[in-house]
Amino acid sequence: MAGALKMKLTRQLLSLTVAAGCLLLPATLWSAEARPQVAKSSCVECHSAFPPPTGVSEAQWAADIHAQKGLSCASCHGGDAKDPSPEGAMSKKAGFRGKPKRTEIPALCAKCHADGAYMRQYNPSLRTDQLAQYRTSVHGKRLAQGDTKVAVCIDCHSVHGIRSAKDTRSTVNPLNVASTCSRCHSDANYMKDYKIKTDQFAGYSASVHHEAMVVRGDLSAPTCTTCHGNHGAAPPGVASVENVCSTCHVFQAQLFDTSPHKAAFAAMGAASCITCHSNHRIVHPTDKFVGTGNEAICTNCHAAGDPGFAAAGRIHDDLVKLDEALKRSAEVLDKAERSGMEVSQARLEEAQGRDSLTKARVTLHSFQPDKVEQDTQAGMKIAAKTYQAGLQALAERDYRRKGLGLTLITILVVLAGLRLYIRQTESKNQSGGS
């Protein structure tokens, strides 16, 4: 009796241990019953055996956001996805319409996505104006004119494996948007009838925006849809480029609005921002961009003798002087710090000097040398102060080293004298004893 009771308690303890362990396992290791389930579909059972493009695997369908929300093949294609027979599943009486035409796809998707009441039950925050926006886009307008080569919903979102835009594997996740757009816009043969460039993705891939987005994973960095829009995609016009860029670069845009270039660019019909920085291939700007040197952008419009040429040179010189002063200060502080000297306060002030340089590089968008000089002069004062702090720290280091050296010499002299005294004393004692 005691043995049976012991066995029963052991089994119960084992069961509790296993159950507790399951709670600690990753979700992917739970039982199939614990995972999100997708309803079985007779359509997928057949089409999983077909090759693309009609082939749809069970794994592909299970990953689709629509399947996860409970929709079936019949939601888009009509028919009865629960009927195991091909005749029943594709019954005209059940509304089977098969593969929709490309021209029908935006309206087909909008049957759900433009219905606010319907979409609210799945995602109240999701916009429901995609179709209205699409009709204002270059893609939508061309589709309405009968051009079936332009992008429709499935070209960007895919077809049967549509994932949430938050999923990093989604074709419309911010990390993947540029690659998705490039499937058409980088294909010279596909785009030849539209007479537009196909180097946008190559340019973007070399830009600071791409580096921030893809390399550093900064999802706030711009990608194609940030500047062109998504469903209402259209290239920004000359007059609207500044407004687009200013959604991120607020201070630069405000300064440009007060600059002499504002009216000059408008008179020339030149787009602000991209005239100097380009559009897709936006590289990290350096101080060489402004000024009168070989790499300066200013010389594209200004020549020796005009006021703008002189102003550009003055701005460049001020920026370079401050940058060099801060580097000189940093070198002295680095040397002092490596020597073990305390320079933390000077380091804090040095950071303020760097801030002044950053501010000056933003202020240059006013293209007014006096305003830039105000920022650089503030930085120069800080750089001079921190440089002197570094020199004083090095002087203190040298003073301490000299003091330590003199102390060591004194100690050595005393030790040598003491040793000599001891030897003489020992020698006298030995002589007296003999």
Image (tube, rainbow, N blue to C red):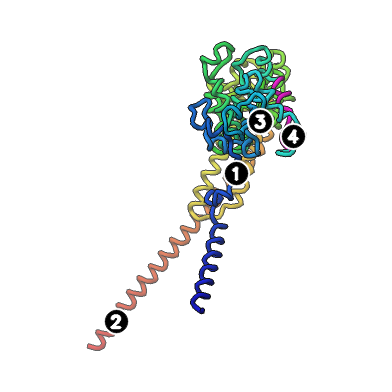
Q: Residue furthest right?
A: 117
Q: Which numbered mark, 2 or 1, is in the foreground of this view?
A: 1
Q: What is the span of residues highlighted in magenta in the rendered image?
A: 124-135
Location of residue 35 in the rendering, given as x and y in whole percent from the top left corner:
58, 47
Q: Nearer the viewer, residue 296 or 414?
A: 296
Q: CA distance from mark 3 to mark 4?
A: 13 Å
Q: Taking 19 as reference, is 356 left or right?
A: right
Q: Which mark is residue 426?
A: 2
> Does dot 4 land on a helix, a strand or a loop?
helix
For the residues carrying marks 3 and 4, which lies nearer the camera in this image? 3
Residue 118, label in figure: 4
Question: Which badge, 1 or 4, is on the more N-terminal residue?
Answer: 1
* Magenta-drawn stretch contains 238: no
- Rate crowding at label 3 as few (under 14), some (14 to 19) or many (20 or more) other CA atoms within 10 Å: some
Quick check: 225 left or right of 60?
Answer: right
Q: Which residue is mark 3?
A: 75
Picture quadrant of residue 191: top right
Q: Is residue 187 above or below residue 253?
A: above
Going from the N terminus, do you reach mark 4 or mark 2 first? Answer: 4
Is disc 2 surrounded by few (<14), some (14 to 19) or many (20+) residues within 10 Å? few
Looking at the image, is mark 3 or mark 4 earlier in the sequence? 3
Closer to the chain start, of discs 2 and 1, is: 1
Identity of the amino acid at label 1? Answer: Gln
Q: Residue at x 74, y 34 (%)?
A: 118
